Amino acid sequence: MKNILILLLCLIVIGTTVEAKIVKDSLYQIPKTKVAPVIDGIQDNIWKAIDWNMQRWYNVGDPPSATSAADSGVGLAGMSKAMWDANNIYVLVYTVDDIITDIPANANWNQDAVELYFDGANDHAAETSLSGTQYQMTFSHWTMGKEVGHLYNMGVRAPFDTTGMEYKITDVADDAGFPGWMLEVKIPLANLGIDGASAAAQKIGWEVQQDESDDATVGRASMSKWWSNSNNSWANAGIWGTAILSAREVDTVLQIVKAAKAPTIDGTMDAEYKNANPATTNLFRVGDPPGADAADTDPIFGGFVTAYPMWDANNMYIFCDVVDGIITDIPANANWNQDAVELYFDAANDHATGTSLSGTQYQFTFSHWTMGKEVGHLYNMGVRAPFDTTGMEYKIVDHDARGNEGMLTEEGSGWNLEIKIPLANLGIDGASGAGTKLGFEVQLDNSNDATAGRQGMQKWWSASNNSWANAGIWGYAQLTDARIDTRVGSSPNVVSGFELNQNYPNPFNPSTEISFSLAKSEKVKLTVYNLLGKQVAVLVDGTRNAGHQSVTFDAANLSSGVYFYKLEAGSTVLAKKMMLLK
Ligand SMILES: [Ca+2]
Ligand SMILES: [Ca+2]
Ligand SMILES: [Ca+2]
Ligand SMILES: [Ca+2]
């Protein structure tokens, strides 16, 4: 149970990374896909192009605390992904559940189940029952293997036409990741009241809920939600979140975007990375090999990495955001046997199956224990295949606070890794870089104990622990000139085109830069408040152009402490925290 709790904590932390504050206009971006997934309950390659969207809320009992279920509310965690094309919306839900209980006699919601909510009208008016294009669909685990026959009996609220709809449930084995199950769903857009031909940029009411039962008699013991921490989504579409059918297309080939400006290799995230297509670890694996080590029963999780790659005529740049609940530095262990990020590049991109790396196939292992000693460890970081590190740089810094306005706060619960590698050293000609295809993989090694070594790993592309020897199983990337305006984020807080960035530097003395982005030219106000809510500065008040903006905040006349800065545009408000340290 402790394991799942650690997982849950980590997931919640991930869910609160991008903005400190959830605002009502926040949108969950659903990207468009060129490739339809196979509805078989298994994660297709195209799904790997999309981040997991973490469940944010957790509710024990129904109503909370009303039951005395043995599993006291930490046996459930989860995440989802979605994408759409001209015909359908596709949803993949991963439910981490240590006790699966199938109780066909119970109501659908009163057992292990996933609920999806859609409102094509997206009006968010408070109500007491669903109507019109407001649909609730409940997919119970007990229907696994019987999906076709149960399409009409899966707890849809509001009459729904299931013609053309498919779903499939599969179990996920403990040693392949976390115990639980996967649900893959295809729903024709027309059935949801959405015209697929003109759907781009359409907003829909959207919610993902997981129902948890661990006992045949108790019924639902707990639930997790993405958007609203309420058990009233079944009756009130007004409390659902909002998703947007984004025109942004995803592809099985990761498009590495060209950097408009070279980032500074300092372990902090430059604004340019916001345009990168992230590669997030999708696949989880406990132990090495799975289940081989008694210590693997400890923290199955504790780790997650999102890599933001970019390139320019000279270099490859990658910023990695690592969430790791327990950071363990063990210089005496092998690099791979401790907390580390591994990156794999193959400029030849031949994906030929092999038993060792050669040619332009490179593995890099960046261990957290080298933080502060990076320069001296460039030659000792576990590169496979001889590699010229001339001109290469990397930098590791621990996370600062991830904000305290979400459900939980975890100070210092992860680390950043920023890397610059000359393209020439990788075997890439930067002058003709656009269009270059690469073998690519991202891996996180997780250790939580000085003696146990690696206890789990997360991968972007392949669940295998053989990337160190076989470039044939790496994923696919391509250098592209194309600019991308919005990214598909794991965070529910990503607002299309409207963003407020963390100030830099932070903490600061006495001045710092605050940057934000606007989707369109509009009137905005950027103000600074102290902890008592008193306004201490107005930095912007007027119309600003679309795109990236930044202002300098000079606090020479203020005293040390925590301040908030707030960006307002129309009814949308974003806020962040900063610290003045004199
Ligand atoms: Ca599939
Ligand atoms: Ca269960
Ligand atoms: Ca940087
Ligand atoms: Ca760790």
Image (cartoon, helix red, strand yellow):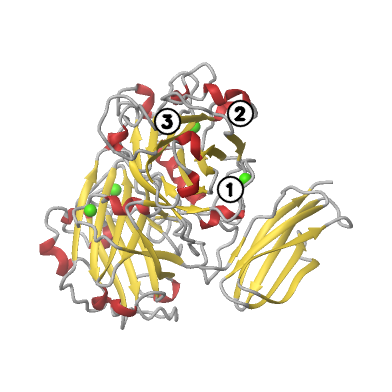
476 displayed left or right of 334: left
Question: Which quadrant would residue 391 be assigned to in this image?
Answer: top right
Question: Which quadrant would residue 566 be assigned to in this image?
Answer: bottom right
**Distance (Cα) linking label 1 and label 3:** 34 Å
Q: Nearer the viewer, mark 2 or mark 1?
A: 2
Q: Secondary structure at mark 1?
A: loop
First along the sequence among labels 3 and 2: 3
**Which residue does the numbered mark 3 point to in the structure image?**
363
Q: Nearer the viewer, mark 1 or mark 3?
A: 3
Label 3 crowding class (10 Å Cα cut-off): few <14, some 14-19, many 20+?
many
Residue 142: numbered disc: none
From this viewpoint, is residue 194 visible? no
Residue drawn at (19%, 76%) of the image: 161
Q: Nearer the viewer, residue 253 or 454?
A: 253
Seen in the picture, residue 337 relative to 48 is either above or below; the reply is: above
Residue 374: numbered disc: 2
Q: Nearer the viewer, residue 105 or 67?
A: 105
Seen in the picture, residue 561 relative to 265 is either above or below; the reply is: below
Q: Amino acid at mark 1?
A: Thr
Residue 88, image x and y in percent? 25, 69
**Which residue does the numbered mark 1 point to in the structure image?**
409
Q: Residue furthest top?
A: 332
Q: Amino acid at mark 3?
A: Gln
First along the sequence among labels 1 and 3: 3
